[in-house]
């Protein structure tokens, strides 16, 4: 599961934003933050998402990581829900998928791994 979560962040950051292979991501950034700097901001967001993927893989302070992921996903999706629903893959229904992803992150870190005192930093 660790590798799957990291892969989601890496794909969204690298493929969709840094490489720009999914143009609507930059359109969403332009809608929310303005046209003037949408490409560099999209690039920075993508690099940050790649950083989250790396953080997940390191296993460093995993509970803090999970909380950060939950906050990031919730914030991004709330903004998109109200400011750019027409640019989302599934419109406002995207919020359902975001909630499921948040639930998965929570369940993985705080339910399944509740008693883990030491985690491996590699995918297993």
Image (cartoon, helix red, strand yellow):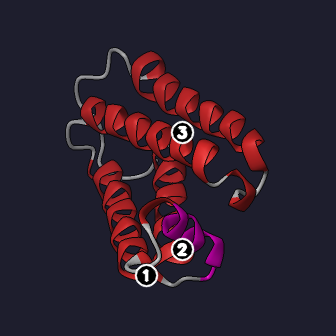
Q: Is residue 24 magenta?
A: yes
Name the residue rendered at 28%, 35% in the picture: 62
Name the residue rendered at 33%, 15% in the picture: 115
Q: Earlier in the sequence, mark 2 or mark 3?
A: 2
Mark linked to residue 39:
1
Name the residue rendered at 63%, 43% in the picture: 81
Separation of marks 1 and 2 at Cα, in angstroms = 6 Å
Sort mark 1 into few (<14), some (14-19) or many (20+) by Cα contacts within 10 Å: some
Query: Is residue 22 toward the left or the right of residue 58 in the image?
Result: right
Q: Earlier in the sequence, mark 1 or mark 2?
A: 2
Labels 1 & 2 near each other (Cβ < 8 A): yes
Mark linked to residue 67:
none
Q: Nearer the viewer, residue 123 or 78?
A: 78
Pointer 2: what residue?
Answer: 26
Looking at the rendered structure, the secondary structure element under dot 3 is helix
Looking at the rendered structure, the secondary structure element under dot 2 is helix
Labels 3 & 1 near each other (Cβ < 8 A): no
Separation of marks 2 and 3 at Cα, in angstroms = 17 Å
Q: Quick check: 97 above or below 18? A: above
Pointer 3: what residue?
Answer: 78
Instruction: Find residue 52 and report its image quarter.
Output: bottom left
Image spot of residue 123 (x, y percent): 43, 51
User: Can see residue 22?
Assistant: no
Name the residue rendered at 44%, 76% in the picture: 38
Q: Quick check: 103 above or below 65? A: above
User: Can see residue 17?
Assistant: yes
Prevailing SS of the magenta stretch: helix
Q: Earlier in the sequence, mark 3 or mark 1?
A: 1
Tell me where the magenta segment starts and ends, as one range.
21-31
């Amino acid at each position: 599961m660790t590798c799957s979560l990291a892969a989601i962040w890496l794909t969204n950051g690298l493929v969709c934003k840094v490489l720009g292979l999914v143009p609507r991501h930059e359109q969403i950034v332009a809608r929310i933050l303005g046209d003037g700097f949408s490409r560099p901001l999209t690039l920075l967001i993508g690099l940050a998402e790649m950083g989250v993927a790396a953080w997940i893989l390191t296993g460093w302070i995993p509970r803090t990581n999970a909380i950060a992921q939950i906050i990031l996903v919730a914030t991004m999706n709330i903004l998109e829900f109200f400011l750019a629903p027409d640019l989302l893959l599934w419109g406002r229904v995207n919020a359902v998928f975001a909630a499921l992803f948040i639930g998965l992150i929570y369940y993985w870190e705080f339910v399944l791994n509740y008693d883990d005192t030491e985690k491996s930093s590699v995918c297993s």
